Amino acid sequence: MTAFGYTAMGEQTPAKQLVTDLVAAEMAGFDFSVMSDHYFPWIEEQGHSPNTWAVLGAAAQATQRLPLMTFVTCPTFRYHPAVVAQQAATVGVLCSGRFTLGLGAGENLNEHVTGCGWPVARVRQERLTEAVEIIRELFTGDYVNYSGRHFTVERAKLYDLPDQPPPIGIAVSGPDSVSLAAEHADAMITVEPSADLVRQFEDRGGTGKPKYGQLAICYGPDEAAARQQARRLWRWALPGWHVMAELPDPRAFEAATEHVTEDDIAELVPCGPDLGQYVKAVKQYLDAGFTHVALVQVGADRQHGFFEWAASDLLPALREL
């Protein structure tokens, strides 16, 4: 059975609300949750970007059963992989093993802040591979020494570990990242309903492993208002991943998407009160072979009504699929 999750979107939501939203998601009946890990919002209008790991610590204590997951953390620039391993292990302890570590190669938007530059995709994938190797070794609880092309670890050891190592998911967008995920990850992560990515992942060793997808929606009783909200807060996503990974700051995303229209964004983000369009959009992920689908409700001010509607209408309809 497919699991349906809630996305706590730090780029659009204040830190305290992220925690209360996750409590509400648990009460509404979502099967799991994911949380973005950014230094910047995508565009200035989103207006937020608190530290994800601090929020996860609070959410681990505020929720009781809801699985938590990073979607995704880059363990190669802002964070050294040894630090990511410690953060993930601690959150795993705090939530009694309900944590999954989602990893990715990152975006220039968030990783340039440390002044290390932004290398080509091949180098980013090399760094991610080394990072995953380091994190897995540290999850054993043993002393770890590691000398790679990009990272060095000297006598590192984690003392607080959950009973089982957190599963690791890796974000994919093309053949190289799919191969990396199939070899090194416990799950695949992507943001498009691509049957081709699922097929590649399975063919290269990912058969039987979870496949996580994500869908942005903008539910509301007024379709015109929902379309306006989606265009205002989600237009940054329209250029696609190859652009999203390279632009350096929110001002660049605003310039790149200035001419995106409401009709453009409505093709990407279902908007308004019609339940059928949301079921149809989610079904694309199920048909493509995804085992987990996380929903993003666009707009921090629209979460309360969304949870009520999700509990009464959306989740029952999705589970009928």
Image (spheres, grey):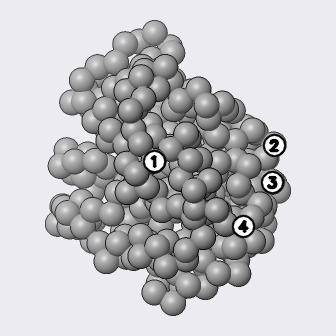
Disc 4 vs disc 1: which is toward the camera? 1
N-terminal label among 3 and 4: 3
Amino acid at the residue labelled 3: Thr
Gap between marks 1 and 2 measured at Cα: 30 Å
N-terminal label among 1 and 3: 3
Name the secondary structure under disc 1.
Answer: helix
Q: Which residue is mark 4?
A: 307
At horizontal 42% and vertical 22% (from top left) the residue drawn is 255
Q: Which residue is mark 1?
A: 262
Q: Which residue is mark 3?
A: 20
Residue 214 spot, x, y in % from top left = 46, 58
Callout 1: 10 Å neighbours few (<14), some, many (20+)? some
At horizontal 50% and vertical 39% (from top left) the residue drawn is 73
Residue 41 spot, x, y in % from top left = 57, 31
Q: Is residue 320 above or below residue 142?
A: below
**Viewer-proximal residue, 311 or 211?**
311
Name the secondary structure under disc 3.
Answer: helix
Gap between marks 4 and 1 measured at Cα: 24 Å
Amino acid at the residue labelled 1: Glu
Amino acid at the residue labelled 4: Phe
**Viewer-proximal residue, 67 or 314?**
314
